[in-house]
Amino acid sequence: MASKDISAAVQKSGRIIHNPDLCRGCRICEVACSAYHDGICSSHLSRIHVVPDDLALEFPAHSCKQCQYPSCYYACPKPDKSMSIDSKTGARYINEEECIKCGSCYRACPFTPSLVWVTEVDDKKRYYKCDLCRVREDGPICVEVCPRGALTYEQRGKSK
């Protein structure tokens, strides 16, 4: 396993901010996310998850917080291969072609539930997380399609 200096901050990244006061739980963000990343409309494969509390009329959304000191990145046994940091955007992302599916990133995420998602595809585990649509010129698709403006993209240190 490669040694990483966890005391050093990595390149800063933006993040997606969810305003629960504006969200009505339509889940369009989930469908757009999975369609963009996987070519299929599936809330299960989305990198953002709306977890409705229908009785309270609350619709919190969860996606990777793009931590300044990303535990998922530091825990990965294949840094800069399986778990990477985009040199242009700073987004922390899983390179699924290189991922060895050990689950270190999933277990290292400090949030409960983990903001690294795991699913079974063809009897194989798959780990994935929000990558801020790092190769998409217009930024995160969930932000663009949210009909109520409940999602915004915030660059570290300034709002967009």
Image (spheres, rainbow, N blue to C red):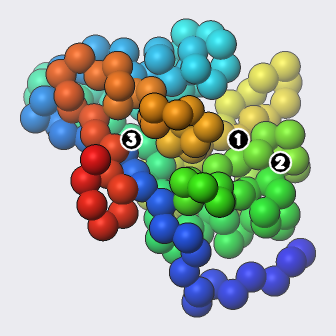
Task: State if disc 1 and disc 2 touch (CB < 8 Å).
Answer: yes
Identify which amino acid the numbered label 1 is placed on: Tyr
Q: Label 3, on which residue?
A: 62
**How far, Cα to Cα, is label 2 from label 1?**
8 Å
> What is the crowding at mark 1: few (fewer than 14 residues within 10 Å), some, or many (at least 20)?
many
Quadrant assignment, res 126: top right
Q: Label 1, on which residue?
A: 127
| Spot occupied by residue 93 in the image (x, y as percentages of width and height) | 64, 50
> Is 87 placed above or below 69 here?
above
| Spot occupied by residue 120 in the image (x, y as percentages of width and height) | 74, 27
Identify which amino acid the numbered label 2 is placed on: Cys
Disc number for residue 47: none
Residue 93 seen anywhere in this rendered image of the structure: yes
| Spot occupied by residue 104 in the image (x, y as percentages of width and height) | 72, 60
| Spot occupied by residue 12 in the image (x, y as percentages of width and height) | 48, 67
Residue 102 seen anywhere in this rendered image of the structure: no
Tell me what residue is drawn at x 30 percent, y 67 percent. 157
**How far, Cα to Cα, is label 1 from label 3?**
16 Å
